[in-house]
Amino acid sequence: ANDRLQFSATGLPAGLRLSADGVIAGVPTQTGKPAEVHITATDLSGLSQQTTLLLGVVEVPGVIGLSAAPQADRLLHGGENIDLLVQLNEAVVVQGTPVLNLLINDSPAQATYLSGSGKDQLLFRLSAPPYGSGNDIQAMGIETANATLVGLTTGQSLLTQIHGVRTQDIMLDNSAPLAPGLALALDSGADPSDGVSREGRVNVLGLEPQASYAFSLDDGATWTAGTGTQFSLPAASYDPGQIKVRQIDAAGNTSPVAHNLQKWLIDAQAPTAQLSVELPDNASVLKANATATLRLILSEPLPNPPHVDSEAGQLGPWQAVSETEFTATFIPKNLIEGTFALKLGEFQDAAGNPGQYSSQSATTIQVDTRPPLAPSLFLTDTGRSSSDGVSQNPMLQVKGLEPQASWAYSTDGGVNWTNGSGESLTLADGVYPRAQILVRQTDAAGNRSGVGQNALQWQIDTTAPAVMGQAIGGDDVVNASERSAGVWVAGLASGSAQGDGVKVSWGNVQKTTTTAADGSWAVRFASSDIPSGELTSVVQVSVTDLAGNVGSSAPQTVRIDSIAPRLALPQDLLPSTPDGLGEGLAGVVVDNILNAAERAIIVAGPDGTWTLQGSTSAEAGQSVTVYFNARAYNGSVAAGSDGSQRWSAPIASADVAELAHGNRYALAVD
């Protein structure tokens, strides 16, 4: 009983066949009388058994085909109707309401007769059962309890049993489709699975062929019919479960609802960045050994802040002030100078939107980490030598200063520093050994230069020598004998050094010499160098020291008295000289005769009672000598009341007493 049998048959009418399970099926192609048909059953061991039956073929109306009626929808689900077309091998006349028994996917069902009497096709209507799914519909038979079906040709009743008639072109679908899936078409940005995208396209996955779908963005409150396999989300944030989707298959079955499993963020807005530079102490230039702060402000949080490139230096790591603000330290390179661009690198937000630079993103930074060159000091070398470092000009020129640089100098070898101004400095008088005067500059960025210095010893001397001349000839009067012999003009220049130049001008003659170690000097004027005659002349002396300072003496007035003065004696006293004026003698003698009475008056009086006087061309103050009786008497020249020059000399009374009566005495004036 448990053996598996194989069947075979011989003698079957044409059009019939024996199935593997021993069923004779098919449509005979011709009628015939009953004949023997031998059927053999063989088990797996090879044992067989044969039986014989008589089988004839007679022609009666019967069902030979089953299909959906034209124009009918061949896909249906429970409760939907479909018209079935039953094909007969003979036209039949139908009376009553026959019922078509079916097996739909092995489940029994019935279809109700609609029309077809007198034709070889009968139309039945099937109401699909609400269960089962498949495309196997088999005709099992026609119930004729309330109807008759008779063939028009044979007059035979329709064969109510139906074998082997089925259709598979009708699909009964009572199964709900699976819930579709949801996925972002593009999960952009750095993380491809974070649910953040710059695009709102959503792929609907798992749709059945010919199925439709609908989606909801408000947790199922409202639904929108979808098209294709995508729908778009507006830019917004969507919580898990907020986005729902369902599908309706071609049969009309609605799937369960699917939803987004993670939070989705749709962001189509490009992020922006602002980059600014903050220099220490509000400086405009970044100097050496200093750092700048770069400040980055973002329009939204980013997975990573952008990097900054610059030829001017290196940026340290970003430090977060907030989610959208960062700072970093910028360290400049050494020995560079200029304005450099700070190039903000490419960046994108979590959604993958490329960043956009604001107007401040094209930022520059001015860097000066190159120390300026040391300034130079220049002395205006005056005096006898232009290269001895001695000058009367205390102002030093400072060369090599950069624009907007400040500078300072030291005159004590760097112990103390003084801020300079302009492009020069002024030194006090003194000697400055090599490297005692220092200068340095600080550029606009604050970089300090090396130190410039005086390479040689410098001496600043702004004080002119004080010049004093000695009286020429002892009295600043040059008489004829002095002029004839020549005179020395000498003096002293205090504050001078040995070798300082001396220039002496007397009239139109100039003489030069140098000072001795003690500042003294002397120069000889020969007779031919000295003005002649009776006149007043001026001697001017100047001394030029090593630094070129010129000291001058006050004009020295010298009287030239190289012509002997003219002296006049009383005309009647002695023979007149060519220049005599015929003056009388003062006192009692007015007639050039000294009588006894006159002599007695003079002798009795004090010395000087008798004064000899006369006119002269000599200047007031000059001395005269009167020779009388072989004796010399000193006198002087004074201005008379009439403006003329008068000489006078007192005669001693005792000398007059010695005069003898009757003698003649000579009188001379020199």
Image (cartoon, rainbow, N blue to C red):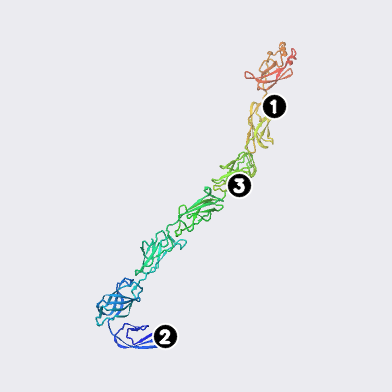
| Closer to viewer: mark 1 or mark 3 | 3
Lower sequence index among marks 2 and 1: 2
Q: Position of residue 151 (x, y in %)?
A: 25, 81
Q: Is residue 222 left or right of residue 275?
A: left
Label placed on residue 451: 3
User: Which image quadrant is residue 630 in?
Assistant: top right
User: Which image quadrant is residue 240 in?
Assistant: bottom left
Q: Is residue 500 left or right of residue 92?
A: right
User: Which image quadrant is residue 386 in?
Assistant: top right
Label placed on residue 44: 2
Callout 3: few (<14), some (14-19), or many (20+) C-alpha neighbours within 10 Å? Answer: some
The amino acid pointed to by label 3 is Val
Q: Position of residue 301 (x, y in %)?
A: 46, 56
Q: Secondary structure at mark 2?
A: loop
Q: Does 416 sit above or below residue 121?
A: above
Q: Position of residue 482 (x, y in %)?
A: 69, 28
